Image (spheres, grey):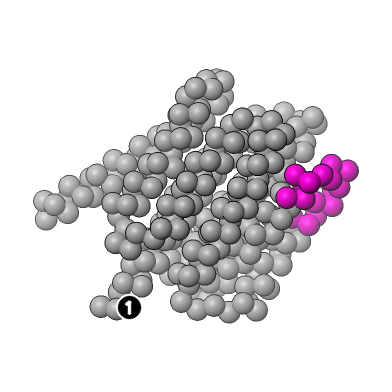
Amino acid sequence: MLLTKEFLNKVNILIIAYFSIAFIEVFAQYFSCSTIVQLSRIAAPLLLATIYKIKSESQNPFFYVLMVLFLVTNLLFFYSDTHNFFLAIVISIIQRMVMLLLIIRLMSEKNYGRIVLAAIPFLFIFYYLNSVTSEFAAIEFNTLFFQSILVSFIGGISLASYLKNDNRQNSWLLISALLFIGIQFVVFIERYYYSVISLSVFNLIGILLSSCGYFTFYKFIIAAEKKDTNQYI
């Protein structure tokens, strides 16, 4: 029992540290403390990978790949000039593909017709965003829209799974998907309307959405792994 308490305390301390870093990054971004922002963006993926390593019995290598990509995009978005932004979007696309692969591998039931139907509302929303900003069309914008398609299918899988069975695993996945869809909105607004309105607040919102999105995705992975383990007991 003592070992169990020590184990839980260690995990809880790391989780508190993870969210503390997210809030530190928000304040550092607001006060333009670039060094602290950069360190926070490095620390967050490393902490989440450590939490997963301690908590998971399966040790899925794709989750660690996802954390490496999370770290790389964090740094590339920090240096957000045109070249780095385009590269960050490309790596983000690989991120979303890894997420889709993880989700599909962990889902027990796969009804692709239901998934496509559930993804249609998200696809229409991002299609609208793309159409109203068509004057900005460029290779990086088309790449961003392709990323939106992947996020829409993540949303479709999560919504279809939750409506089929609102268990803990599917609940975490739906929350995570909605947060990543929110991030996609922020990226569209931040990148293509910066000359019209002040967007510093959207950048801060993006930090919180990203931190919560990856944490809830970790919770989905853990819940899915426990379910798979229980099936073989």
The stretch in magenta equals 126-143
- What is the x, y in percent for residue 18? 39, 39
At x 49%, y 41%, the residue is 71
**Count of numbered labels shown in the rendering:** 1
Q: Is residue 158 above or below residue 140?
A: below
Position in image of residue 229 (x %, y %): 31, 72
Q: Look at the image and tell me whether residue 205 can be seen.
A: no
Q: Which sits in the foreground, 107 or 64?
A: 64
Residue depicted at 75% across the width and 44% down the height: 140
* Relative vertical location of residue 105 with respect to residue 86 in this rendering, above or below: below
* 213 relative to 57 in the view: left or right: right
The quadrant in which the N terminus is found is bottom left
Residue neighbourhood size for the residue with mark 1, other residues' Cα within 10 Å, grouped as few (<14), some (14–19), many (≥20) = few
Residue type highlighted by circle 1: Gln
Callout 1: SS:
helix
In reply to whether residue 17 is colored magenta, the answer given is no
Q: Residue furthest left?
A: 2
Q: For the stretch drawn in magenta, what is the main secondary structure?
A: helix
For disc 1, the marked residue is 231
Q: Taking 45 as reference, is 78 left or right?
A: right
Position of the C terminus, as image quadrant, is bottom left
Give percent across and percent down for residue 132. Answer: 85, 48
Q: Position of residue 159 (x, y in %)?
A: 58, 67
Q: Is residue 86 left or right of residue 155?
A: right
Image point (72%, 62%), residue name: 123
